[in-house]
Image (tube, coloured by chain):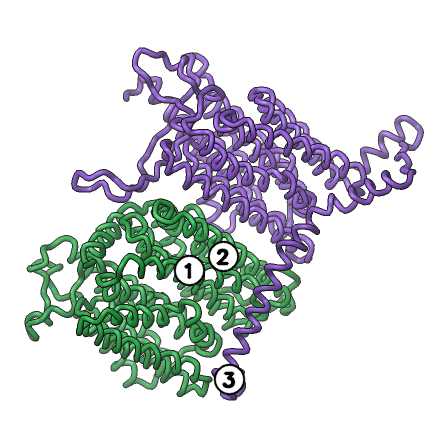
Chain colours: A green, B purple
């Protein structure tokens, strides 16, 4: 039997669920942490196998349990979704591995694994109706976590209620062939992606929820995935142009706000929003080049922003919430964290040698053909983001350290391996991006073909 | 290609020249990330060894070029990325990596290796037992790689990659003594200027990509192999004519000039150069005396056929260079510390080099650049010993050296104040660009926090611990 003929995709859904059940049965926190690490790594491996299988063996030979049981193909990897579940599994694995011991908590780890299963299902869902349901269900875990922890949840829940309402209304309109359906659906997905003015919920979530919750809820950009699956097939050119301009405004607006922040978490929120908006911009010109650039940037951003967030989380675990009003001098305490922060930060703004660099080049090149103003705006947003990243690096890691010099807050071996892995991925994909770009180009062609 | 082919050996030399600094960056970077820092001796040996290999490679390449009467060697091109182009269709987009060794890049890359090697040896002693020794040499290696890539770049995208590496290492080395606030503040200022200028270069790269050249300097300047034409007769630098129209040259040339102004501290960006003196003397010497500060001029030389296409552009370059030289000459007169004085002296020469480029000269500014880089490097590394040198001279001649008097009123006093304030350039940038930007976004931030507080109600204060 060929290894790739196993139902790896379905296995990747099930492993986190089993892992969550197993660790919830144990009272030993160390066992629970190890269980979650093993589950997340196994899920990642499974998702990678599923992706490789989708490329090497014909579709009809890939097992599809939904097709067999329900006579309907709901979950399948196609050209568009190919590597996305693997990327999602990677983000979860990195987050679990980099979780400081201080933050180990059975309930949180268990919930994280269940959310992972949900997100994997979302990114491998090809049935639009199921995708709508999964997106709606996906907003529940962060809301529950905020409520359980006694954190302010009104802003997040309020926005997500609007999102779910628009989502279902829009889908209803599309199913009944109403022209307003796609507009309403697009509004829902713009809200989910944090496009201005529907971005306040994300900033609030980052401020009050744990960094890992915020990261995992947004990093993989399910809103963008849904936009490509649900909106692009029905959107008119004018609508896509509007999407692009709104995305551009968000990118520059958020980048500007990131440069003036006095709170580290809010800085991260705005930097993230700015980058995710760039991907929305790429959908605008709906040409193969810009769409390829946007899809590549999507993956580059997910990895680099995860690395950045994990660096920030490691800093907070050691030094508490960081105020950016003055310098903290943390380099002497944690030099490896400083390097990791800078590397992932620069990777997210398209520094040469990283995947974002080539992705941004392709995206800007594609946009300059169709809309030069948007291309120029994108360059401006990237420049401002670069300033924001280095500003925060200098504020956090340079200056006179107020910590006692005998204390040593250097990163643990687990965290070091996570940072090294992220760095290696960023640089390796930046130096040899051809296979990924070819894959994303095929995905962009499929997305354009799906347009009515 | 076989072992007997000259092309094979030229390619080998070219690859060695590029691979050596790359290997150095990887070695120092990976060991830093793994927290297995190399000893001072190993790091210094690595840097000097890399520079020695680079110099050797360049000399061999130069010897082969002279022997074969070649003026233009291409390493590559490699189609690093292409979008589309499968199933027989034409690719929508290419990203080509290519390196060119010609009359411009060979001396510049050779200069980079020589000066980096010399300063590396100096820094090995100067930075001995400095807490950030390893950090210094890691950033130094990134700078070396950036200079070599920029110098030998055959496409504007490749040049941009090297350009960014130089900018990052520059800003981080200015902030090297990061326990003090001034170096950090100045490092951030320089990074901001670089970032804005680099945006212009990125736009120029994209625009050039869309014009006929696809970002390739050879195609831009009309260099291509023709049948029945000897390589020596092909129009390699500084000859050639731009394959763009006059209006296109305004756009490309204007963007490149903006980028060059930022990198080389031409007006209105001249304020960052004295700020950069906060870094260690070795980095000040090699960056702002020798190599990095000349990158703008180098870029203008590289696209010189585009400048020739438009008289207005050439005049703009000339005026910018000359005004920078005059400003720097005046400002340099009133500086109270040796490094600031040297920085303005350096800027004066850079301004003159740029003015020479604007006049349509090519070899003269190149020779000027090479000579100036060597002289200024020497002056910078002697700067820490300036007072001792001065006293030695006074002892030798037996009298105190005169510092001169400044008297006068009205206009002279105004000029003095203008020079002391360094032309108010930083103040203008701060007051008219940075402060309004920061003020606007701080107001927006306060507005958003207010809206969020209203939406969140009292629960925001309870949960915010």
The residue under the point 58% across, 21% down is B361
Percent coordinates x, y for residue B292 in the rendering: 58, 37
The residue under the point 41% across, 57% down is A420
Dot label at residue A275: 1
Image height of B137 relative to B356, above or below: below
Count neighbours of disc 2 (C-alpha within 10 A) and say few if under 14, some if 14 to 19, many if 20 or more. Answer: many
B199 lies left or right of B2: right
Dot label at residue B460: 3
Q: Chain of mark 3?
A: B
B95 lies left or right of B290: left
Dot 2 or dot 1, earlier in sequence: 1
Secondary structure type for disc 1:
helix
B430 lies left or right of B50: right
Dot label at residue A83: none
Percent coordinates x, y for residue A263 in the rendering: 55, 70
Contact, mark 3 vs mark 1 (Cβ under 8 Å): no
- Between the residue at mark 3 and the residue at mark 1, the CA separation in whole angstroms equals 27 Å
Count neighbours of disc 1 (C-alpha within 10 A) and say few if under 14, some if 14 to 19, many if 20 or more. Answer: many
Q: Chain of mark 1?
A: A
- The quarter of the image holding the C terminus of chain B is bottom right
- Per the image, the residue denoted by label 2 is A385
Front residue of this view, candidates B309 and B459: B309
Percent coordinates x, y for residue B54 in the rendering: 48, 30
Q: Chain of mark 2?
A: A
B391 lies left or right of A427: right
Count neighbours of disc 3 (C-alpha within 10 A) and say few if under 14, some if 14 to 19, many if 20 or more. Answer: many
Secondary structure type for disc 3:
helix
Image height of A119 relative to B380, above or below: below
The residue under the point 57% across, 58% down is A391
Secondary structure type for disc 2:
helix
């Amino acid at each position: 039997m060929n290894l790739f003929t196993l139902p790896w995709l379905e296995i990747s859904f099930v492993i986190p669920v089993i892992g969550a059940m197993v660790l919830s049965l144990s009272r030993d926190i160390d066992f629970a942490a190890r269980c979650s690490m093993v589950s997340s790594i196994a899920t990642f491996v499974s998702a990678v196998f599923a992706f490789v299988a989708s490329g090497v063996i014909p579709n009809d030979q890939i097992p599809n349990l939904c097709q067999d049981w329900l006579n309907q193909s709901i979950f399948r990897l196609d050209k568009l979704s190919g590597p996305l579940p693997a990327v999602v599994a990677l983000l979860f694995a990195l987050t679990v591995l980099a979780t400081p011991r201080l933050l180990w908590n059975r309930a949180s780890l268990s919930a994280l694994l269940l959310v992972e299963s949900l997100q994997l299902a979302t990114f491998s869902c090809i049935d639009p109706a199921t995708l709508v349901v999964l997106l709606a269900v996906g907003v529940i875990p962060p809301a529950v976590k905020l409520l359980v922890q006694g954190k302010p949840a009104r802003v997040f829940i309020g926005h997500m209620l609007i999102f779910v309402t628009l989502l279902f209304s829009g889908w209803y309109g599309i199913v009944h062939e109403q022209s307003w359906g796609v507009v309403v659906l697009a509004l829902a997905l713009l809200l989910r992606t944090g496009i201005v003015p529907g971005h306040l919920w994300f900033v609030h979530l980052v401020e009050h929820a744990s960094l890992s919750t915020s990261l995992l809820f947004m990093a993989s950009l399910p809103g963008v995935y849904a936009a490509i699956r649900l909106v692009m097939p029905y959107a008119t050119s004018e609508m896509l142009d509007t999407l692009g301009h709104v995305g551009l405004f968000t990118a520059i607006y958020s980048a500007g706000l990131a440069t003036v922040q006095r709170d580290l978490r809010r800085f991260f929120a705005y930097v993230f929003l700015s980058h995710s908006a760039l991907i929305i911009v790429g959908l605008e010109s709906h040409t193969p080049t810009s769409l390829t650039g946007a899809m590549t940037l999507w993956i580059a951003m997910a990895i680099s922003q995860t690395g950045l967030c994990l660096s920030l989380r490691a800093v907070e675990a050691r030094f508490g919430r960081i105020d950016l009003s003055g310098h903290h001098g943390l380099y002497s305490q944690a030099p490896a964290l400083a390097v990791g922060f800078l590397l992932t930060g620069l990777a997210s703004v398209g520094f040469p040698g990283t995947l974002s660099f080539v992705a941004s080049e392709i995206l800007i090149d594609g946009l300059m053909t169709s809309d030069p103003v948007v291309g120029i705006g994108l360059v401006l947003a990237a420049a401002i983001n670069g300033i924001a990243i280095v500003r925060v690096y200098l504020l956090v890691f340079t200056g006179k350290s107020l910590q006692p010099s005998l204390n040593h807050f250097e990163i643990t071996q687990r965290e070091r391996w996570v940072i090294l892995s992220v760095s290696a991925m960023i640089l390796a994909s930046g130096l040899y991006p051809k296979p990924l770009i070819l894959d994303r180009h095929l995905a962009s062609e499929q997305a354009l073909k799906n347009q009515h | 290609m076989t072992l007997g082919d000259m092309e094979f050996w030229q390619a080998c030399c070219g690859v060695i020249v590029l691979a050596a600094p790359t290997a150095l960056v990887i070695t120092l970077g990976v060991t830093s990330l793994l927290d297995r820092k190399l000893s001072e001796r190993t790091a210094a040996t690595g840097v000097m060894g890399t520079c020695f290999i680079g110099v050797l490679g360049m000399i061999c390449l130069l010897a082969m070029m002279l022997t074969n009467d070649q003026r233009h060697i291409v390493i590559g091109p490699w189609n690093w990325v292409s979008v589309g182009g499968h199933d027989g269709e034409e690719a929508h987009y290419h990203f080509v990596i290519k390196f060119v060794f010609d009359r411009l890049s060979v001396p510049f890359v050779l200069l980079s290796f020589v000066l980096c090697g010399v300063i590396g040896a100096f820094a090995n002693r100067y930075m001995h037992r400095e807490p950030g020794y390893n950090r210094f040499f890691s950033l130094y290696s990134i700078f070396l790689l950036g200079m070599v890539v920029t110098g030998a770049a055959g496409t504007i995208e490749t040049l941009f990659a090297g350009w960014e590496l130089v900018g990052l290492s520059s800003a981080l080395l200015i902030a090297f003594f990061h326990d003090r606030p001034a170096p950090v503040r100045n490092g951030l200022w320089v990074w901001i200027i670089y970032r804005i200028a680099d945006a212009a270069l990125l736009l120029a790269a994209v625009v050039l990509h869309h014009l006929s050249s696809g970002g390739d300097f050879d195609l831009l300047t009309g260099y291509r192999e023709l049948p029945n034409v000897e390589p020596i007769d092909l129009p390699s630098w500084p000859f050639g004519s731009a394959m763009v129209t006059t209006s296109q040259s305004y756009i490309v040339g204007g963007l490149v000039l903006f980028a060059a102004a930022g990198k080389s501290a031409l007006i209105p960006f001249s304020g960052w150069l004295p700020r950069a003196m906060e870094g260690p003397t070795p980095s000040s010497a090699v960056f702002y005396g020798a190599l990095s500060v000349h990158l703008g001029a180098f870029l203008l030389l590289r696209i010189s056929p585009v400048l020739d296409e438009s008289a207005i552009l050439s005049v703009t370059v000339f005026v910018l260079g000359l005004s920078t030289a005059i400003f720097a000459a005046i400002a340099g007169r009133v500086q109270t510390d040796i490094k600031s004085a040297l920085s303005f002296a350096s800027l004066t020469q850079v301004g003159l080099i740029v003015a020479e480029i604007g006049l349509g000269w090519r070899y003269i500014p190149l020779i000027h650049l090479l000579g100036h880089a060597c002289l200024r490097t020497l002056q910078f590394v002697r700067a820490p010993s300036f007072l001792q040198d001065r006293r030695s001279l006074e002892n030798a001649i037996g009298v105190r050296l005169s510092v001169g008097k400044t008297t006068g009123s009205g206009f002279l006093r105004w000029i003095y104040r203008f020079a002391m304030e360094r032309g108010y350039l930083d103040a203008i940038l701060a007051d008219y660009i940075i402060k309004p930007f920061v003020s606007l976004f701080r107001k927006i931030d306060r507005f958003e926090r207010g809206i969020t507080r209203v939406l969140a109600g009292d629960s925001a204060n309870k949960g915010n611990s």
